[in-house]
Amino acid sequence: MAGFGEGFESALAAAKAGEEWAWTALYRYLSGPVQGYLRLRGSSDPEDLTSETFLQVAKGIRSFEGDEPAFRSWVFVIAHRRLIDERRKASRRPSLAATPEEAPDPDRFRGGDVEDEAMARLGSAQVEATLAPLTKDQKEVVLLRIVAGLSVSETAEVVKKSEGAVRILQHRAVATLRRRMEEGA
Amino acid sequence: MSKEEWSDRDLESLFAGREPTEGDLACLAPIVEAIRREAENPVRPEAGAIVPALAEAAKGSAVGAPVGHRGSKPWRRRLVTIGGVAALATVGVGSAAVASDGAAPGDLLYSVDQAFEAIGIGDGGIQERLDEATKLTENGQPDQALEHAANAYRKEGNDEAARALVQAAVSVQNQGAERSAEVRAQVSEMLQWMESTDAEGRNFGQGVSERARGVEEAASRGKSADAPGHNKDDSAGDSGDDSPGNSGRGRGTD
């Protein structure tokens, strides 16, 4: 994942002061990866959860101190918690929410013409199928590493595991994906 | 390097979209790219719809807003109007300098945190309550941690979990086992499981009940010397038979 680039510190300071340009920049920087992470983790409403995540970030921004990697890690900690809360609420209201494992409707996030949408559905289905053999923990780690661009230590912070456990999980995930590639070939 | 033994550097390269040194990882590069592309889609609504709300929330514009409509107590209004936002000082979490409204019950800032949640800013959620309960356990208050978690689940309508937690709290208090290292370890493990499990509904309630019974048993075995708080989970939580979609398994409970 591409970094924010130069100017993160000034954007952070401006965001703390409530400057809209800064929030536009931060939102554009991370809302896509956050929503993508939530969608691929099976959120029933990743768009809404992304908004909730950013509102929580906005609430706490004035007491945040850290660099860009720490900020990114913090945002994904919040997103991760929101996802878990969504699942807990859904388990008590099954008639109102999708199950966590239900594949999200890729059409929600697509625009463009019919052909583009068909290709997008194919891509989404393929990614879902690719990740299907992974366990929940493996999928979580892989998505945080790839989509969120978090390091091993940052990922460990989000999922509340040791760095060693995260390394084991990513290793097993890669081994599983590679074996599936070999079987498919 | 033998088959399926990859260096951290190669996995870093793979995940970052760079060419890994190990040739047998190169075949996964298209998959990584597909995952990244799938995730990075245009976000709706557009930034313009939400940015003003984010900017206002950051400015703490709700500070000073009347909270009477929520029926909150006068002391909460005073906290909010006097500058409760500024009082939400940084509380370090882990090794990164991460902001959190991480006060726990009994902390000076906890009432401010609750004041914001009372007026609808930052709903807290179960995860925050579990974090707070973990801090209580680390502070040597496992019984209060259990009560705090019970209150959170009761508000969420999860009565089975709440009952089990209250029962465990009462047991700890009756046995005077707050200082028991075993009790604290059991409570810590239970809180970690509750934070990370994907068990839901009945499975979740049963998991809480089982662990709460473990706390009660530890409490009945009596007090022992102080011990440090919980350690991070070193297990991968990823057993060989943890097949996709399987739920109801906690860490190290196979």
Image (cartoon, coloured by chain):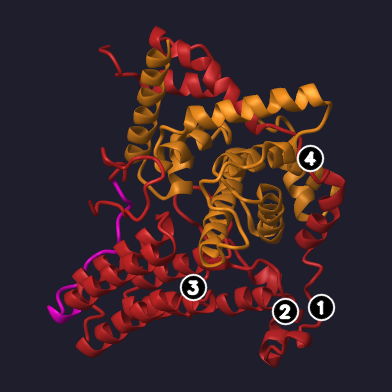
User: Mark 3 or mark 1, which is nearer the start of the sequence?
Assistant: 1
Q: Chain of mark 2?
A: B
Q: Nearer the viewer, residue A115 or A141?
A: A115
Query: What letter labels the chain drawn in red?
Result: B
Q: Secondary structure at mark 4?
A: helix
Are the numbered discs 2 and 3 placed on the same chain, yes or no?
yes
Badge 3 element: loop
| Residue A20 x, y percent position in the rendering | 85, 49
How far apart, in angstroms, are the residues tagged by discs 1 and 4?
A: 28 Å
- Tell me the tag on residue B80: 2
Q: Amino acid at mark 4?
A: Ala
Above-or-below relation of A140 to A58:
above
Residue visible at 80% across and 78% down? B64
Q: Which of the two residues, A107 or A88, is positioned nearer the viewer here?
A: A107
Q: Residue at x 32, y 76 (%)?
A: B142
State the quadrant of the N terminus of chain B: top left
- In the image, what residue occupies the spot 61% across and 77% down? B114
